[in-house]
Amino acid sequence: MSATATAARMFGSGIRRREDPRLITGTARYTDDITLPNMVHAAILRSPHGHATITKLDTSAAKKEPGVVAVYTGADTEGVLNAIPCAWLVPNSDLKVAQYRALAKDVVRYVGDAVAVVVAESAHAAVDALDAIDVQYEPLPAVVDPEKAVQKGAPQLHAEIPGNVAFHWTVAGGDVDAAFKSAEVVVRDRIVQQRLIPTAIETRGAVAQYVPATGDLTLWNTTQNPHIVRFIMSLVAGIPEDRLRVIAPEVGGGFGSKIPQIQGDFIAVFCSMKLGRPVKWQETRSENYVSTTHGRDHIQDVEVAATKDGRITGVRATVWAGMGAYLSTAAPGIPTILHGLMLSGPYTIPAVKEDVYGVYTNTTPVEAYRGAGRPEATFMLERMMDVLARKIGVDPVEVRRRNLIPPFDNGHNVITGLTYDSGNYEGVLAKALERVNYQQFRAEQKAGREEGRYLGIGVCLYVEICGLGPSQVAGAVGFQGGLWESAIVRFHPSGKVNVFIGASPHGQGEETTFAQIVADELGVGVNDVKVVHGDTDNTPMGWGTYGSRTTAVGGAALAVASRKLKDKAKLLTSHLLEAAVEDIDYADGKFFVKGSPDKHKTIQDIALLANVAWNLPQGMEAGFEATSFYDPPNFVYPFGAHVAIVEVDADTGHVDLKRYVAVDDCGPQINPIIVEGQVHGGVVQGIGQALWEGAVYDDNGQLLTGSMQDYALPRADMLPNIEVLSTVTPSPHHPLGVKGVGEAGTIASTCTVFNAVIDALEPFGVQSVLMPCTPERVWRAIHRKGA
Ligand code: MCN
């Protein structure tokens, strides 16, 4: 048998993504492409009110419309569907979970809340028949602002939760009161992280096929975590997990919004269970804007205590986090665990305290959105660095340097109780500043101001908690699941390899990078490895792709499984070559007796021999595959420094983003092209928040930005070239040293650009502008015309 061992190392190689050909040629198959015999289509009637009582709901006329098969309301789901669970029950927070139904009953609590569903022979017939449903509402007062929602006399969303407070959580470390008492300088600010709409290019959808004869349900679903969907669907629909198969076909982006199961998913399943026919539900874009989850929505009151030379002695904050009308799957963990624990960032801060109030409002439920909690923490600190710098008259970079944690490579404890794995924050900062020639820029800025040109520079450092796991910590912080990942590496007799993973990438590129990992670990060609994911019937359990964890946790599972295989191969080689196993060495896909590399077995030889099992050592099982369930010992903590340069037109308020430099450290990079792509995408989403994006509700709970014409997503022509650099600080606990990168760009870029805008506006004495920094808001700030 000829060996096809690779000489070139794949880890670190910027090979092209193998996912791309099918995506760019239109051959990828998304949920909406699934068509089954006898399939019917569901369309959902949604509340047009932010808050209202349903006074009449008569579906009899709709049932008679052409092509209509059935019409269901909340009453029909009684006893069939359980409430949609919240799966992050943050402890010590007095958490109050309102009952969230797949179809509302009696009261609607946000525009988009599902009220009834029409099932028809065609999608058009289903949509047309929605008009024939006789529904009447008695509008109730609504509240959309989390701070107003907790005030006395505010409209109440859930009778059983007076005051609208879903939870109150506190993080504290050190003596913050003493820090403020003895502070030489105190600076304060109010930061509003506006609500955002994730806007994945593929909207949400589900095809449910329930087979009454067997009790089996197959669900094709646009999800980031098919195994969690199976778990939760079994709880809500009462179908045992072993009867449930969830398939995530091609998924066109998620950015956090495809972590939770939303009303439409449960409705599709319910309809299929009732009718015994396959049912498809696919969101329109307008529907997506109200029915799929939103992100951010944070009001932060922050104060920082410091010495007059800029050493921070304490950070204190109160946060009102708008949660929407119900608690989405992972929602409570975002403004708490993923935000509050990052309160000291890359700095040595001796005392912190934050109170977070999660608040129900008459808005679409909020979930993770790229970065999820960490952009909010980063923004808070990095904005305050600039505020402090301006107050004490010290350069903002210098203030940061005075507070940075010195480099460390194996653990550093911070005041919130976390242990960062490794970091060199000064390293990324120096590299970013060098790239933009910071000092020279400051001179140009000064000269420009004299000519009426308003240039600004923004700097932002970040460290993020990601690679979500270990499971023990997940349990301790109330996450209702594990956070390990699994991988099966299976060699076929021909020497080709399938890798089956529990995680479910949906744009990140692990079909490529995971093949790279296996190619190096086992010395096979990268094209001899195919990665299989996204189907609960043929992949091992996994907890999903979010929290930049797939490589940090799933990639580690893969490395460990591959190493187990190598151990088995050594045993078999020792048997075949009649040598002691300790004397068997491995290099580049070959196993040989130490010192005699010519006398070897290739891994492909071993794959064949182990699979045919004609001559195995006593006690060895046949087959050549290994499984790993990897639960990491700690999170990973990637970090970076970003710099933006803007020019503001004082006459129009227009912000011209002239340069963007990102220096990120996610440990050794498996595929630098993919890493660069991830940073690009992330940076752009963060810039979108700083300059253009924002979900706007009126006081009645109407979403005023419910389409792409109103919700301003960044386009390529609005952006400069993004300069991506990196440093490499391996994680001490990951088998390959890697950390995550999927969210890095978003975490840093919002504050980087925001700081640049405020820096440009310094001559006008502008301290802050509401995000997004639209030309109107910037112009008003310059000319003091109110918000
Ligand atoms: N990678 C690498 N070397 C490293 C670290 C990562 O080559 N040292 C590669 C990975 O192998 C993978 C990619 O970079 O191909 C991102 O990996 P990772 O950081 O593990 O992130 P996840 O795969 O867990 O993805 C989740 C993350 C999150 S939380 C959001 S939100 C997000 C993101 O990824 N949503 C995305 N990137 C996205 N990209 C696309 N196209 N679509 C989304 O919805």
Image (cartoon, rainbow, N blue to C red):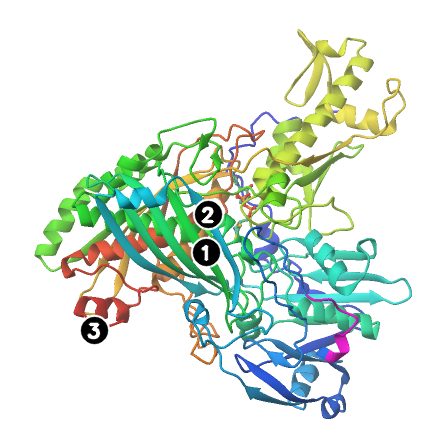
Helix, strand or loop for the magenta stretch, by majority: loop
Specify whether 349 is left or right of 767: right
Specify whether 44 is left or right of 786: right
Residue interval drawn in magenta: 75-83
Q: Position of residue 613 (x, y in %)?
A: 88, 26
Q: Is residue 563 above or below residue 529?
A: above
Q: Is residue 415 above or below residue 602?
A: below
State the SS at label 2: strand
Q: Residues within 10 Å of mark 1 (few under 14, many from 20)?
A: many
Dot 3 or dot 2: first in sequence order is 2
Which numbered tag is attached to residue 356?
1
Residue 653, visible in the rendered structure:
no
Disc 1, disc 2: CB below 8 Å? yes
Instruction: Write the residue at 75% across / 59% down.
Output: 235
Q: Nearer the viewer, mark 3 or mark 2?
A: 2
Dot 3 or dot 1: first in sequence order is 1
Identify the amino acid type marked 3. Lys
The verdict on residue 78 being magenta is: yes
Q: Nearer the viewer, residue 73 or 754?
A: 73
Say whether mark 3 is within 8 Å of ligand 1.
no
The verdict on residue 594 being magenta is: no
Specify whether 366 is left or right of 344: right
Q: Residue furthest top?
A: 595
